[in-house]
Image (tube, rainbow, N blue to C red):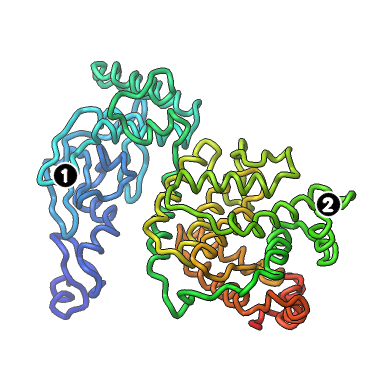
């Protein structure tokens, strides 16, 4: 039946006992995407082990490392070489984990023990086991994800498993690893970079770093049909700083009438009934109206972090209880989405902002910087406001129009950010949203107060977003 189907072109053979009805995709892609089904077919009951277990089953250098009691050393398939080491699943004292298609995955304790012995790289490909710096960083990632209590349980599991397997010769090395990760011993020279960062309080969120890399690449290759390369700034700022501050605070729920906000800015005095909210308007206005500070940026991530802290301190100067200019001390979230944990804020920011020097000045770099700050959410409050300030600094530095998000466009803006986060740094939806707001901002007659007032009405900019959604109103271009 299979032979007849192959002859008739309905299926094709990829390897012995492996067929597919996908006649288009490259064989290597099909094998890698379906590796658990293939592995269960050729080595039923195998255990994903060694480097592959530490990499959560990802294929590295075209290889997958497993343990099996079947007499095989290597199985070569299109795009994948399965390297087999003799062994069996472990049931006690620390059982291996269940995996897809009846396979098993080495327990974290077994993964640690199995990766302690050094192995050689051949032909420039990944070795069977992690190098010592890689293993240190693997354990550091576990520490960041699990916390002290779960990490201690891993240490006890590893000791128990080593004793059961007669591998007590590794216990000294295991003890040193846990002591370094826990801060009881300093990292050795040439230790893994994440371990070093962890002990210095500068660890980073690896998922976010991957997201930032994807986002940075996207912003260097913007589709001109989605977003213009450049839009000119107004001849004079005029009303722009006022409305930039007003709308940026509105997005965050700090709502005043325009007349109330104008009075706060003109008198430089917050209202007695709402002093903290009034200070938010003033702090944001001071940031966006500063003729020098509003366009000061850098390619140096350390300097960018410094500017971020200074601007946050200015924006939240009227809320000392929120720690102006200080990193958050408690985790924050929006809905069910968690931002970077406090212990990884500074390290993740520096990793993300280190990529800006590879992005050309202008809209791409501006959106990238805003996304990094929003995704890290480094402060207890004021993250959205300071992220938009950082974005507009990049635009002003490139002599381009800034971006204002008017009231009616709040939900589109939030949805664009949410999709970028949930899609692991895919910025296409956010770019579309921000391109429209950029065109609107660049077309507004900011130098003329009366003309601005008229266009705000004509373009629906002042509409409540919920009312606008119910009535079908949108942000129109001037």
Residue 361: x and y, percent? 44, 64
Q: How far apart are labels 2 and 1 at the CA level?
A: 69 Å
Left or right for 345, reference 234: left
- Label 2 residue SS: loop
Q: Are marks 2 and 1 in contact (CB under 8 Å)?
A: no
Residue 83 is marked as 1
Left or right for 342, reference 64: right
Q: Which of the two residues, 71 or 283, is positioned nearer the viewer here?
A: 283
Q: Residues within 10 Å of mark 1 (few under 14, many from 20)?
A: some
Residue 317: x and y, percent? 71, 44
Residue 467: x and y, percent? 77, 73
Up the image or down, 169 lies above or below 371; here it is: above
Q: Residues within 10 Å of mark 2 (few under 14, many from 20)?
A: many
Q: Which of the two residues, 412 or 403, is positioned nearer the viewer here?
A: 403
Left or right for 363, reference 24: right
Q: Which residue is mark 2?
A: 270
Label count reads 2
Residue 223: x and y, percent? 42, 75
Q: Toward which corner of the image does residue 86 lie, by quadrant?
A: top left
């Amino acid at each position: 039946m299979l032979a007849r189907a192959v002859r008739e072109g309905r299926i094709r053979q990829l390897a012995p006992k492996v067929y597919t009805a996908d006649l288009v995709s490259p064989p290597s892609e099909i094998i890698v995407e379906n590796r658990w089904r293939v592995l269960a077919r050729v080595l039923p009951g195998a255990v994903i082990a060694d480097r592959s277990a530490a990499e959560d089953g990802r294929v590295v250098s075209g290889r997958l490392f497993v343990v099996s009691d079947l007499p095989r050393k290597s199985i070569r398939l299109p795009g994948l070489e399965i390297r087999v080491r003799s062994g069996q699943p472990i049931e006690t004292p620390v059982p291996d984990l269940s995996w897809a298609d009846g396979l098993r995955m080495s327990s974290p304790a077994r993964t640690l023990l199995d990766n302690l012995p050094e192995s050689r790289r051949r032909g420039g490909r990944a070795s069977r086991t992690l190098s010592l710096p890689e293993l240190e960083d693997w354990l550091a990632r576990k520490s960041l994800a699990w916390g002290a209590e779960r990490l201690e349980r891993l240490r006890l599991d590893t000791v128990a498993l080593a004793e059961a397997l007669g591998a007590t010769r590794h216990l000294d090395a295991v003890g040193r690893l846990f002591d370094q990760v826990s801060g009881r011993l300093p990292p050795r020279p040439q230790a893994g970079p994440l371990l070093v960062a962890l002990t210095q309080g500068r660890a980073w969120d690896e998922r976010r770093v991957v997201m930032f890399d994807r986002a940075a690449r996207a912003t260097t290759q913007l589709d001109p049909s989605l977003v213009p390369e450049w839009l000119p700034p107004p001849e004079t700022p005029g009303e722009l700083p006022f409305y930039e501050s007003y709308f940026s605070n509105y997005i965050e729920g700090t709502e005043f009438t325009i007349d109330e906000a104008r009075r706060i800015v003109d008198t430089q005095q917050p209202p007695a009934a709402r002093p903290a909210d009034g200070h938010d308007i003033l702090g944001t206005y001071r940031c966006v109206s500063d003729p020098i500070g509003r366009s000061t940026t850098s390619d140096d991530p350390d300097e960018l972090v410094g500017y971020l802290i200074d601007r946050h301190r200015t924006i939240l100067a009227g809320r000392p209880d929120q720690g102006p200019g200080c990193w958050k001390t408690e985790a924050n979230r929006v809905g069910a989405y968690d931002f970077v944990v406090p212990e990884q804020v500074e390290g993740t920011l520096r990793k993300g902002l280190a990529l800006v020097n590879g992005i050309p000045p202008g809209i791409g770099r501006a959106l990238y910087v805003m996304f990094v700050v929003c995704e890290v959410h480094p402060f207890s409050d004021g993250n959205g406001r300071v992220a938009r300030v950082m974005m507009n600094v990049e635009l002003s530095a490139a002599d381009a129009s800034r971006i204002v998000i008017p009231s009616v466009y709040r939900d589109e803006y939030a949805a664009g950010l949410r999709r970028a986060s949930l899609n692991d740094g895919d910025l296409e939806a956010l770019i579309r949203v921000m391109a429209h707001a950029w065109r609107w901002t660049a077309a507004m007659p900011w130098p003329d107060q009366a003309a601005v007032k008229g266009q705000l009405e004509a373009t629906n900019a002042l509409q409540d977003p919920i009312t606008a959604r119910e009535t079908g109103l949108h942000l129109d271009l001037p």
